[in-house]
């Protein structure tokens, strides 16, 4: 396993050591787990990425408009199938949203 030396503010160092002591856990194990948790939490979440776009698109506000919405969906799918519109690959959207929102 590789070693890493980092500088911590005194308050964070005390907090980390206090938690490790209370949990009777090795400081290295706790630190690794905290770092893994932070890195995992940085994966873009669709709901977070979509939040700025809430309300920008028209559509039914409740399911009673299902028939109209189904018609709209069929029209959109047909447009894609006929090549009149193209989608944006998920990976491209993911990168753009990450760059825009810092995630």
Image (spheres, helix red, strand yellow):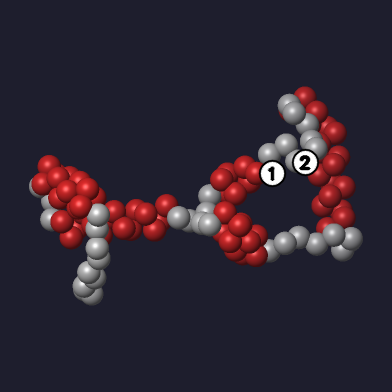
Percent coordinates x, y for residue 70 in the rendering: 81, 38
> Which residue in the rendered view is the most extreme toward the front?
10
Residue depicted at 82% across the width and 52% down the height: 77
Q: Quadrant of the N terminus?
A: bottom left
> Label 2's element?
loop
Residue in the picture at 29% in, 54% down:
34
Residue marked by disc 2? 57
Q: Report the residue at 57% width, 54% height from top.
A: 101
Residue 16 visible in the snapshot: no
Image coordinates for residue 96, horizontal then vertical, percent = 63, 61
Asked whether the viewer can see residue 70, the reply is yes
Would you identify the image quadrant in which residue 29 lies? bottom left
- Residue drawn at x 42%, y 52% as measured from the top left: 41
| Relative depth, front residue between 14 and 70 | 14
Structural crowding at the residue carrying mark 2, measured as other residues with C-alpha within 10 Å and reported as few (<14), some (14–19) or many (≥20): few
x and y percentages locating residue 14 in the rendered image: 17, 48
Query: Which disc, if any, is residue 5?
Result: none
Q: Secondary structure at mark 1?
A: helix
- The picture places residue 38, in percent across and down from the top left corner, at 37, 54
Mark 1 lies on residue: 53
* C-beta proximity under 8 Å, tags 2 and 1: yes
């Amino acid at each position: 396993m590789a070693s890493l030396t980092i500088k911590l503010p005194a308050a964070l160092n005390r907090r980390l050591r206090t938690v490790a002591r209370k949990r009777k856990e090795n400081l290295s194990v706790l630190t690794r787990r905290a770092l893994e948790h932070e890195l995992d939490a940085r994966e873009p979440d669709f709901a977070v990425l979509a939040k700025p776009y809430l309300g920008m698109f028209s559509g039914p506000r409740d399911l009673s408009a299902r028939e109209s919405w189904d018609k709209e969906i069929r029209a959109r799918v047909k447009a894609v199938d006929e090549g009149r519109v193209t989608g944006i690959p998920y990976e491209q959207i993911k990168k753009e949203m990450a760059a825009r929102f810092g995630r």
